[in-house]
Image (cartoon, helix red, strand yellow):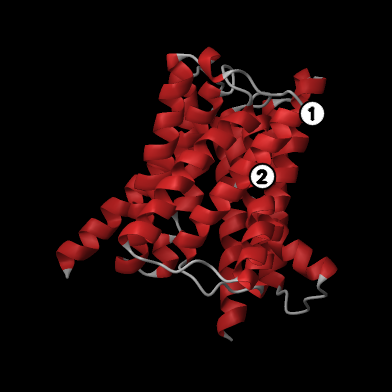
Amino acid sequence: MKTTTTKGYIALTATSILWGTTWVASKYAVHDIPGLQLCSIRQFIAGSLFLIFFLVIKKERIPTKKDFKSLFVMALLNFFLANGLSTWGLKYIPTGLAALIGALYPLSVVLIEWIFYKKKNVSSLTFLGLIIGIIGIGYVFSQNMFATITPELLLGLVLSIIAMLSWSVGTIFLSKHYLTINSYYGMGWQMIMGSAMLFIFTSATHTNVPYSQISIKGWTAIFYLITAGSITSFIAFIYSLKTLPAAISSLYAYFNPIVAMIVAAVFLKEQLTLSILFGTIITLIGVYIVNRSVKKEIKI
């Protein structure tokens, strides 16, 4: 039992590090490949591998018509908008800031449900977490950019925020529309659908480049994103879910932005000061408080 728990913590550590580094790999690649096209290629290959595993090896059934409707909506929200726009936005803003904005989705989920779904059981602890999170992200913004605001920086921020909100709406949608198939099998379908949407959009808007023009650097980044980000990390995450308490296995989300900032500072020479790190930690404390308060309300 002790050995299994140790392996669970190793898997959790791998998840935290690998998913954190995928932000850096994406940042590395978007200077060679348009962000939306990068996502389309990554999602197509990773989604195909997922479907081959579940359809050919696990002999899973084809999803029902009702499941396909839900999968299409989630593909639109989570992979076309969330993954696509966040990757596009990486071209214009620091890697760590993009990862931190992505980590804010629990805050926006609470706000969206409170404002649009009239959810009343929002506790004072939840509001405290929201306030701390907003103060923290505002502090990180002030340290990162207010001295050098550019149209490109604003575009990157808008894309990243829309991506985060899209993921939040996708999370809410999934909570209200349960799938009758394995969630990771469903993710494979979402990736394939998202890839098709991105391919159609980039082809119609001529925002892609010929595959022959993608450099070895670009293909190396894609290979890393697929193997480390879409396959190895998911396997490690699933294992940590099975062997560790849910409250522990979910901690990866709080380490991802910090890993992204540190790795980006080392390999991409992005700015990382104690002030930025302090603001990041404050923001993640706010996110953690919100998550804990919401889970407490659900248990009650």
What residue is drawn where x is 59% and y is 74%? 178
Mark 2–mark 1 distance (CA, rounded to whole Å): 21 Å
Query: Which dot, 2 or 1, sits closer to the camera?
Result: 2
Identify the image quadrant of residue 288. Answer: bottom right
Identify the residue position indicated by label 2 in the image: 80
Above or below for 98 versus 168? above
User: The disc labelled 2 sits on which kind of residue?
Assistant: Phe
Most extreme residue toward the bottom is 300
Quadrant position of the N terminus in the picture:
bottom left
Quadrant position of the C terminus in the picture:
bottom right
Above or below for 9 versus 255? below
What residue is drawn where x is 81% and y is 73%? 117
Residue 116 coordinates in the image, percent (x, y): 84, 68
**What secondary structure is found at the residue carrying circle 2?**
helix
Identify the residue position indicated by label 1 in the image: 154
Identify the image quadrant of residue 38. Answer: top right
Label annotation for residue 292 = none
Residue 195 coordinates in the image, percent (x, y): 59, 42
Residue 257 coordinates in the image, percent (x, y): 52, 41
**What secondary structure is found at the residue carrying circle 1?**
helix
Q: Classify 10 Å Cα crowding around label 2: few (below 14), some (14-19), many (20 and above).
A: many
What residue is drawn where x is 35% and y is 55%? 53
- How many marks overall? 2
The one of 258 and 163 positioned closer to us in this rendering: 163
Contact, mark 2 vs mark 1 (Cβ under 8 Å): no
Residue 215 coordinates in the image, percent (x, y): 48, 14
Q: Tell which circle, 2 or 1, labels the residue nearer the N-terminal end.
A: 2
Above or below for 161 versus 238? above
